[in-house]
Amino acid sequence: MILTQKLEDYTQEQHSTWNFLYDRQKAHLQGKASRLYLDTLDAMSDTLTRTSIPMVEDMALQLKETTGWSIEIVPGLIPPSDFFKLLSKKKFCTSTWVRRRDQVDYIEEPDMFHDTFGHIPPLMNADFASFMHRFGEVGTAIANDGRDFQVTQLQRLYWFFVEFGFIREDGEAKLFGAGIMSSYGETSHAWALRNKLKVFNLEEVMSTPFRADVIQHEYYILESIPELERNLNNWFERTY
Ligand SMILES: [Fe+2]
């Protein structure tokens, strides 16, 4: 199924909700989010637009020119094996529906603000883009083999880094994960716990279950994305 996005499908109210979410969150993230995230968000200001809902095609074109990534439109959450496969082809996925105005503080299912504002900018960074590609390749091999427990381990890695991780920049803990970037409440909550972070350790993270239905109570801080990619490769070699 090929899904498309049409500008005329959105109402003015939806654009204005997007604009509200973007401005409120960008201001809230200043001084708290990683430079990696804030710099790439700024670099995408022409395509990941502020005042109107961005067009996926425009963002995909910019990514393609920068790190070779592209974006596929999906209706919502997709099975892990499909998700891994997309990543292995350097494709991220996003929904195109935007939450209602009365849902600006909380939604159960990820909408376009989460998928795009949260996830897309760091894919402009070569280290993160490389990690995500490798993550997709490893995940595809493991899912194709029907190794459910290892799929769960990869989902935990994704959760505690890509969705809710901190990274260290110039010795300081900074917010990074898309689940934090796209949530006003989670940003305040995570930032308040910045002095109580656990050091990201792949083995530990892979054996730690998570809950998607509550605000997080433990966050991990990653020292280096290339090092995580090397550790993922070592884990993959040991697993096979
Ligand atoms: Fe997400």
Image: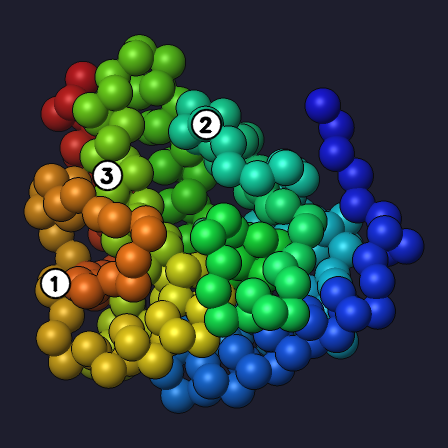
Query: Percent position (x, y) of residue 221?
Result: 21, 65
User: Dot 2 corresponds to which residue?
Assistant: 79
Q: Marks 1 and 3: in contact by CB < 8 Å?
A: no
Q: Marks 2 and 1: in contact by CB < 8 Å?
A: no
Residue drawn where x is 44% and y is 38% of the image:
133
Q: Which quarter of the image is occupied by the N terminus? A: top right
Q: Give the CA distance from mark 2 to mark 3.
A: 21 Å
Q: Identify whether 89 is placed above or below 169.
A: above
Circle 2 SS class: loop
User: Dot 1 corresponds to which residue?
Assistant: 199
Q: Identify whether 161 is placed above or below 5.
A: below
Left or right of residue 173, residue 199 in this image: left
**Mark toward the start of the polypeptide (1 vs 2):** 2
Instruction: Tell me if mark 3 has few (under 14), some (14-19) or many (20+) residues whose alpha carbon lies within 10 angstroms of its own.
Output: many
137 or 212: nearer the viewer: 212
Disc 3 CB within 8 Å of nearest ligand 1 atom: no
Q: Nearer the viewer, mark 2 or mark 3?
A: 2
Q: Which mark is residue 232?
A: 3
Q: Give the CA distance from mark 1 to mark 2.
A: 29 Å
Circle 1 SS class: strand
Q: Marks 3 and 2: in contact by CB < 8 Å?
A: no
Three-letter code for the amino acid on which mark 2 is drawn:
Pro
Q: Give the CA distance from mark 3 to mark 1.
A: 16 Å
